[in-house]
Amino acid sequence: MQTAALHEWIQQELQRAGGSGKHAQPGALILTLVRRAVLEGVLLPGVRIPSSRELAKELGIARNTVVAIYDQLKSEGMLVAGHGSGTFVCRMQDNLRPDPRPCAPLPGTDAWNTPPSPGQIRPIGFSHRGLSYQRHPVHQFWRPQPFCSGQLDLNLFPLATWKRLQRRHLTPDDASCLETGEPGGALELRQAIADHIRTTRGVRCRPEQVILTDGTVESLELITRLLTDPGDLALLENPCYWGASHVLNDHGLTTSTLDVDQNGLPVPEPGQIYRPPRLVYLTPSHQFPLGHVMSLGRRREWLDYALTHDTILLEDDYDSEFRYIGAPIPSLQGMDNTGRVIYMGTFNKSLYPGIRMAYLVVPPQLAALFAAAASDFYRDGDVGQQRVLADFIKEGHYATHIRMTRREYGLRREALLAALRESLLPELVDGRLKISGGAMGLHLALCMAREADDCAMAQATARLGVSVMPLSVYCVGGTLHRGLILSYAAVPCDQIPLLIRQIAPTIRQHLAQIPAPSRVRYPYGTG
C-alpha cells in the first residue's frame, strides 16, 4: 500500500466496521488501525508515513490527535522519527529490536512480510506434564449429569443466611474486606475452624496452625513445595484421588503405590518399597474411592512407621462430615503425638463447590512458613468471604447445615441402595456386582470383576444422561480395580430409582459377558 493512501485504507476499515472517521473518540480507533497496518504488513518496514498534519487533514480530525497516535506508536517501537526527514515504520532486526535508521521501502517479496504457509507454522506444544493432564481418562467421563462426582444439591444451602452475613461484612464504612489479608488467612476463620475440628474431628491444633487454601490440590501443592525435593518418594493408595497423584508427579516426586484393603492402606513390609517415603497420602476416615475405614490398629502402625522413618503422613479428610450411622470417626492427626501428620479439610464438599475454601493443619514449627508461602504463592484475598464463613461457623449455622444435609444425603444414599438392589439384584446376589463403601460420604462404589469394561459402561450410561465415573481411572498402579462410582448428593430421592432403572440394562448387558460367578475375580479387599 502506498503511504499516501493510508487515510483511504483507514476510512475503508472504519466503514467496514460500521462507521466512519467521525467518532466521539477517533484517536483510539485510528491508533488501533495504524498499529494493525504495521503488524499485518499493510505498511512495510522502512516506509515513510504521512506527516501528522497531512493525515489529520485527510481524516478530518485534530492534528494533536494524530501526533498523540504517532507518539504512542513510537513508544511501542513501531515507528521511528528520522532526522528532519519524516516518520518511518521500523525495521525489525533478528534480535527483535527496532532499527532506528530510516531506510528505503523493502520489496513486497521480503520474507518479513510474506505470510507463512500453514505448513510452516509450528503450534505451541504442551509439556509432558500438560500432556499427562490432558490425557488423563477422568476428563472423558466427567459431565455435569446425575451421579457425576463433585456435585452438590445447592438448593439445600441456606442462601438467605449467607447473604445476611455477607451484608454484615460489606458495610459502606468498612473497606478492610478489600485488603489482601494476613498470611495464612483471616484469623477469625482460622480460630473458628480450629474450634470446630477440635470438637468434631478430634484434631489438636491452635488457630495459627490452620492455613487456608482453595482446595485439596492447592493444599498438596503447598506441602510438596515446602517439604519435598524432586526425587523424593511419595506413597499413594491404589485406587486414589487422581489429583493427588498428578500434583506429586508434577513436582518431580517419585510415586509408588500399594493396594488398599478393608483396613485402608497397609504399612509397607520390609523390601516392599525400595526406600522409606517422604510423604504418604491417606484417606483414613473414608478411603477414596472404595469407602473403607482405616482400622485403629492400622492407624497406630502408620504413626509408628512415620516416626521411625521420618515420614510425613498427609490425612485427606475430604467428606468426614457425612457419616450416617454411629459416631464420627476420629482423625488420625488427633492420635499423633510426634507432629508427623498434616491434616487437610475442605468446605467445597460440605457447603458449595464455588466457595473454594479449604485448609491445612500443620505442626506448630511449620506454621509461620506455611502461612507466608500460602500468602505469597496462592491467596489473593477473599477476606470478606473468610469473615462470612467465620461467622457462619461461630454462630452455629454450619453445624445446622451439616445436620440437615447429613439427614438428606443419608436418605439419598438409602434410596440409591434400594434402587440398586431392585434393578440389579441378580448381579448383586451372584457376586458380579458388589457395593463398596460404608454409611458415610457422598458416593458409592459399585465394584465389578476385573474382566468388566467399566469405561465402556460409563460411556454407555453417559449417552443415557447419567454420568458415572469408572473406578479404573483412579487406579495408579498395582491392582486394576473395575467398577462405577455413583455420587448421589446432587440427585433428589424421587429421581434415583428412575435413573437406576434407566442404566441398569446397560450394566447388565456388559456384565453378561463376565465369566460364571464361581470364576469371578475381585481385587483383594473389594470382593
Image: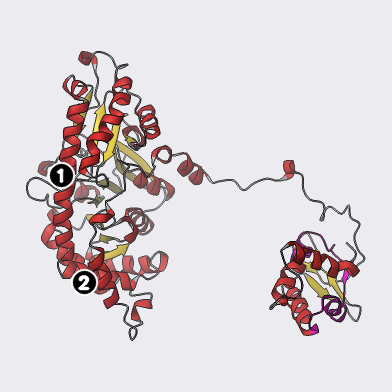
Relative depth, front residue between 442 and 418: 418
Q: Judging from the image, what secondary structure is the residue with disc 1 in?
A: helix
Q: Earlier in the sequence, mark 2 or mark 1?
A: 2
Residues drawn in magenta: 36-63
Q: Judging from the image, what secondary structure is the residue with disc 2 in?
A: helix
The residue beneath circle 1 is 411
**Distance CA(mark 2)–CA(mark 1):** 29 Å
Q: Is residue 460 above or below residue 111?
A: above
Q: Position of residue 412 (x, y in %)?
A: 19, 43
Relative depth, front residue between 41 and 476: 41
Looking at the image, residue 199 sits to the left or right of residue 214; the answer is left
Q: Residue at x 20, y 58 (%)?
A: 339
The residue beneath circle 2 is 391
Q: Position of residue 435 (x, y in %)?
A: 20, 31
Relative depth, front residue between 137 and 7: 7
Amino acid type assigned to the residue bearing label 2 in the image: Asp
